[in-house]
Amino acid sequence: MTEPRSTTGQLHEGAGRQGWTSAKAATFTESVIREMSRLCAASGGVNLAQGFPDFACPPELKEAAKAAIDADVNQYAVTWGAPDFRQALAAKVGRTYPGWDVDPDTEVCVTCGSTEAMIATLLATVDPGDEVIVFAPFYENYGPDAVLSGATPRYVTLHAPDWSIDEAELRAAFSDRTRAIIVNTPHNPTGKVFSGDELALISRLCQHYDVLCLTDEIYEHIVYDAEHVPPATVPGLEDRTVTINALSKTYAVTGWRVGWTIAPAAVTSSIRKVHDFLTVGAAAPLQAAGVAAMELPASYYAATAAAYRERRDVLCGVLEQAGFRFRVPDGAYYVLCETGDLDPAQDSSAFARRLVVDPGVAVVPGTSFYADPADGAHLVRFAFPKRLETLHAAAERLARL
């Protein structure tokens, strides 16, 4: 006999199991970042919460996508990526980082954005009982991804004001249970770019404990006052790194959802199997546009970084005048701020919800970036991948603070 159920799908009170939520899904909430975007749209505010550009992508990408659709490139691509896109991607990596040779046939898996790339990688490489090291503050997907994969996230704090690693704390996080460490550089939400010394430390620990390094490098070309060093090029990490990236940020196409992994052939084989059963494949005509993206000249990346530097400096000036305290980011396109006297209650979640209504600027509360929300209760994150007029509109509103 089946249990009595309500019309909402919940078990009636007294039934053995309450609801349809798995134990894994019950450990985390919906995305706070996407929630703030919805609140912003409802209030008519300026969205400096979610990290998506409000300006056009390069015209070469749009023309290539339209041409592919006109040419009826509308059916499944090869599951792990169209050959011409994988070849163009490998060639672009080799041009950008001389000495890093990528085999497009065995070391690349094209995914539905970097978000799918991360969860596919974790599902392909970790097992229940494993631990995954995550630096905090963190992009909010990493913890849930580890949990959904059956692993336990182990958090290591990046310490303000320069978001440095405490070597003793990082060493203490590694153990025989550690399967992987997630490194996001340039870093969201702090704007930190991991140094060569920090990556060398991570390499030594990964080698000692036989750990995979999973790197989210989606902001690789958005750097200002530091040099981005791909962990896969660091001695000792070459054969134990999964590099995760996407078209989204560099080429201003966050809605296209075309990402990839680069990893040793054996790891890539596992990722490809999981990816196949997660999503089958990324959009075929947009992979054709990805070829055009990979063929853009070096001047495109220099111009992109310069344009973001200008936006960074505009927003930082506005935030300083408004009374926020922060470290100017070295990379990515976010500013993580201490609210200080602007929020005497030190409740960034409530503060962000007030801010989106009055003066009408959406930000992300720092509680979203820590396993213990209290650690981020004094922080909010602003995003600046916006037109200058958008940032000036936000400035006029923030002046009211």
Image: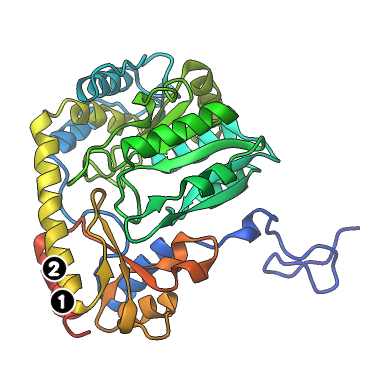
Q: Position of residue 93 (x, y in %)?
A: 27, 23
Residue 53 position (above or below residue 302): below
Residue highlighted by disc 2: 317
Q: Residue at x 61, y 35 (%)?
A: 126
| Camera-nearest residue between 139 and 273 | 139
Query: Quick check: 20 left or right of 41?
Result: right
Q: Is residue 77 left or right of residue 205?
A: left
Tell me the tag on residue 153: none
Q: CA distance from mark 1 to mark 2?
A: 6 Å
Q: Is residue 248 in sight in this rendering?
A: yes
Residue 280 drawn at (x, y percent): 49, 31
> Is residue 74 left or right of 241 when viewed as pictured?
left
Task: Examine the rendered structure and indicate whether residue 305 appears above or below residue 294.
Answer: below
Q: Could you say whether the residue bearing mark 2 is in a helix, strand or loop?
A: helix
Whether tag 1 and tag 2 are in contact, CB under 8 A, the answer is: yes
Residue 365 coordinates in the image, percent (x, y): 40, 69
Which residue is labeled 1 in the image?
321
Q: Secondary structure at mark 1?
A: helix
Identify the amino acid type marked 2: Gly
